[in-house]
Image: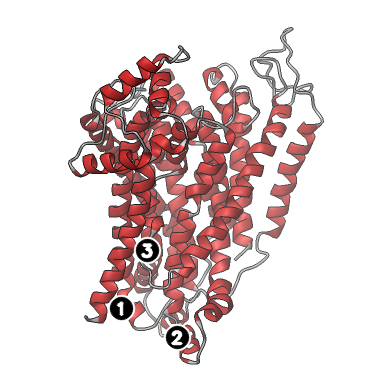
Amino acid sequence: MTSAARRHGRTAVAWALAVGGVVVVASAMPWLSGDDPALRIFRARFGERPATPQALDAIREDLNLAANPIEGAVGWLVGLTHGDLGTSWVSGRAFGSTIKDAWLVSLSLAGVATLVSLGLAILLVGPGLLRVARGLDAGSPRTTAVFAVLASIPTMVLAIALIALVAVRWRLLPALGWQDPVDAILPTVALALPMSGILARVLTSAIRTTASEEWLFTWRANGFRPQRLITAVAHRALAVAIPQAFLIIAGTIGAAVLIEEIFAIPGLGRLALQAGLAQDVPVVQGALALLVATGLVLGVLGIVSHRALLGPTLRAGHGSALAVGQRRRNRNRRLVAVLAGILTLVIVGGAFRSAGINLDGGQFRPPSWTAPMGTDALGRDVWARLSQGSLVTIGLAVLCTAICLGLGAIIGLANSRNRPGIADVLNAVPPIFMGIIMAAVLGAGLTTATVAVCAVGWIPIAVHARTLGSEIRATGFYQAGRLSGGGRWWMLSRHLVPMALPPLTQHALIRLPHMALALTSLSFLGIGAPHDSPEWGKVLAESAVHLERAPWITAAPALGLVALGLLATFAGEDAT
């Protein structure tokens, strides 16, 4: 057997193991909570009515429920091979055609939104390419702030604001539905604007990395024309950014649940959300199967595109100059300190204010000297509630980010063969959708939301680490170290980790506000924090109905998330 055949065989085994693990867990979902599936179906259909043995037996016979997890998993897998996704626990009818139609709707929305966001991102980073061609830095504090603000805008706030202004007040576009092409404009804008900030940030980071490589200095010294330099830098930067772009496309299909719910779009995310809240596990299983299949296809496309763009470079032993590029420290230290100081003062200042209910004329008071951020529908001080909620939102986001950085770096850098793995299987399951899955199995709650965010939040960092690791291993000095007798763990601890950790830390810091956004989104959908919690997502959900009357209630947590995004982005800049 040739080396190429062995390599392809190992890749096929890796794919099979990764897919098999996810499929086995998905097929056993009805039993993961430890409850009798028949009892859960009865609760989904009849609420808290007493469940008699006769009623449970009738449900088992009607739906042909398996007696144990193994039998149920085998039956679900056999049906899946024939295109049978199962029968709804709530309606008692097959839902295969319904869920496929919903998947096509979500795929269309995600595809259009990704194309728009990619076009916006290219426009945003265009000036950076011109500066690199002249020997200048690709970014500036101003452009970094723009990227951070775009990426940190809460999608639900942007969507509700677009409906209130464009659809309701100005009557320019429809607010709800999915019938005509014009119905896709507002949902696409709500999805594309935050995504453009993420893509622009990834592209700028890749451009900066490429700009520090020695070959670019040589080309510039030999008088290469700026157009040639721009083309070469863009080519290398896209090679790093393309896998992330495919990851974003896949994740958007599931993450669009917020947009689909707000705009009443009959997509896969909205269908899965309704099923998850109703404990209709088979529908969530079917949605997960489609998302995993989508993730597999897009994961392969990401790997293939990366190898196609950098194949000759990698084979020639000219990897990324991440290790030899000069680090740019302390560029934003003062700005980071100012932002951190302002955010800390706001949080600490609100901690000394009372968040008590005041129904004696204190509701919906606009900002004033006595209530600098106004009051809410129950007369509670918005500043005090913002401070209380920050401990939950920011604290959990920091915890999730640290966990995901460690897991992502270890798993990504350990993949020395750049083979597919569990990350490529789960890359289409965003935190919001994972929250729906866990809520269907374990029930809603802040713990469920936190575990869901951590369960998939490491994947983008692992994909980035795998891409960086393949380029670092292709550098001349790394290959020289291996030829000199450096073992795998020696090279990993002395070369790979020190070289890849700065950009991965930057990536993790950039992901911090997205962790917070994922937690707030789950609370907004009713999966995370409980009712009347000061957690920022729950505050956004409860204040959405009062947006026109009292916009300051929504503005406080929304601006808090944007400020967190700015702080994390500039801190990430300082970490590289």
CA distance separating discs 2 and 3: 24 Å
Looking at the image, the residue that sits furthest to the left is 82
Q: How many marks?
A: 3
Element type at mark 3: helix
Q: Nearer the viewer, mark 2 or mark 1?
A: 2
Q: What residue is rendered at 55% in x and 54% in y?
A: 404
Q: Earlier in the sequence, mark 1 or mark 3?
A: 3
Element type at mark 2: helix
Q: Is residue 368 visible?
A: yes
| Most foreground residue, 140 or 161 | 161
Looking at the image, the residue that sits furthest to the right is 352
Callout 2 amino acid: Gln
Q: Decide: few, some or many residues near mark 2? Use Cα within 10 Å; few <14, some 14-19, many ≥20.
A: some
Q: Nearer the viewer, mark 1 or mark 3?
A: 1
Q: Earlier in the sequence, mark 2 or mark 1?
A: 1
The residue carrying mark 3 is: 238
Say if mark 2 contacts mark 3, CB within 8 Å: no
With respect to residue 452, does 570 lie above or below?
below
| Most foreground residue, 252 or 210 | 252
Callout 3 amino acid: Leu
Q: Earlier in the sequence, mark 2 or mark 3?
A: 3
Q: Nearer the viewer, mark 2 or mark 3?
A: 2
Q: What residue is rendered at 60% in x and 19% in y?
A: 550
Q: Decide: few, some or many residues near mark 3? Use Cα within 10 Å; few <14, some 14-19, many ≥20.
A: many
Q: What residue is rendered at 47% in x and 60% in y?
A: 462
The figure's colour scheme reads secondary structure
The residue carrying mark 1 is: 312
The residue carrying mark 2 is: 479
CA distance separating discs 2 and 1: 16 Å
Q: Is residue 349 left or right of residue 267?
A: right
